[in-house]
Image (spheres, grey):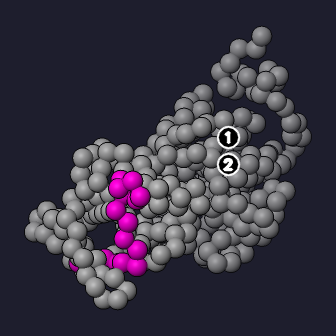
Amino acid sequence: MNKTDALIIGAGPTGLFTAHQLKLIGLNCEVVDNLDKIGGQCIELYPDKPIYDIPAVPECTGEELTNNLIKQLNPFDIKFHLNERVEEVKKENDNWLVKTSNGTSFSTPNVIIAGGVGSFEPRKFSPKDCEKFEDKSLFYSVKNKQIFKGKVVSIFGGGDSALDWAIELSKDCSVNLIHRRDEFRGAQASIDKVHNLAKEGKINLFTKYQMASAIGDQQLKSIDIKHDNNGVKNLKTDYVLGFFGLIMQLGPIANWGLNIDKKTIEVDTEKFETNQKGIYAVGDICNYPGKLKLILSGFHEGALAARACFKLARPNEKYRFEFTTTSTNLLKRLGKKSD
């Protein structure tokens, strides 16, 4: 049985920063994630995609953000349990007993659900002939953009991911951007940029089209796309990218007695605690009035949840807020020398 002051479910950016905040105030924590690597959706879905809304960081990729968050945790000894999914959470006296799919058990007064919503998978193309090209020349995320350099890439989708990758890959590739509607639903600046690149001939734009078939033997050679008026175009292509969003599966979380609405968990905005005492939710999984699904919002939520954990983990101690710039204790925990 692993005993810890707090157990974090999810090793994405929000979970990593929450772990940092817990260790900073002197609490122990362990982290469980059902993926086989640290980084959550940042690493799994867009390790190479530029991120522009992290304060004081003009631009970074999902991989760079993850690596910096891991580096921030270097002063602390945090145990990660990867490739494990939390299956059972039940109350025993003042603690929560938690069991994973690998049989690992935890006893803790605090459980923080950070960012993830159980398992997730991308929405896929409907035509069955697309399946044989998956993970070879047809992908639903970009893990190494270098493989596309100098190639023809056909991108499907109308949201931010499709727009952002069309813009990014147009620098080194021939890009076809295909969407089933005339209107895009991404950021207006990205929409404007795509239309400008289309006018310049750097992006070939096809609207009101959908995938009809993928053509090739072992290697993808071309695709047929079908217009709303039933007209069909054949496009030579080396790679296909599909960005249709994720199908979210709550999994065992649905059975933990939490206040779940539309696959999100209702929390307060003081501690980010759920309707179950000692269980908190931060990141994309939580919901409250005014919620913004931004990484920076998850950092704020994790910082407050971490401090709420102190009361249950150290009931006989009083938490005292300190700044890292002036506190000798906090500087010691960070491995820094005070002036």
Residue 283 visible in the snapshot: yes
Q: Is residue 2 above or below residue 76?
A: below
Is mark 2 in CB contact (under 8 Å) with mark 1?
Answer: yes
Could you classify mark 1 by the number of other residues whose Cα lies within 10 Å: few (under 14), some (14-19), or many (20 or more)?
A: few
Which residue is drawn at the image coordinates 40% and 79% (left, top)?
Answer: 208
> Amino acid type of disc 2?
Leu
Could you classify mark 2 by the number of other residues whose Cα lies within 10 Å: few (under 14), some (14-19), or many (20 or more)?
A: some
* Label of residue 296 in the image: 2
> Is residue 71 or residue 247 the one in the foreground?
247
Q: Is residue 45 above or below residue 124?
A: above
Of the two numbered discs 2 and 1 on the same chain, state the one appearing first in sequence. Answer: 1
Label 1 sits on residue: 55
The residue positioned farthest toward the bottom in the image shown: 229
Which residue is drawn at the image coordinates 53% and 58% (left, top)?
Answer: 192
The residue positioned farthest toward the top in the image shown: 339
The magenta stretch is 198-214
Which residue is drawn at the image coordinates 15% and 65% (left, top)?
Answer: 221
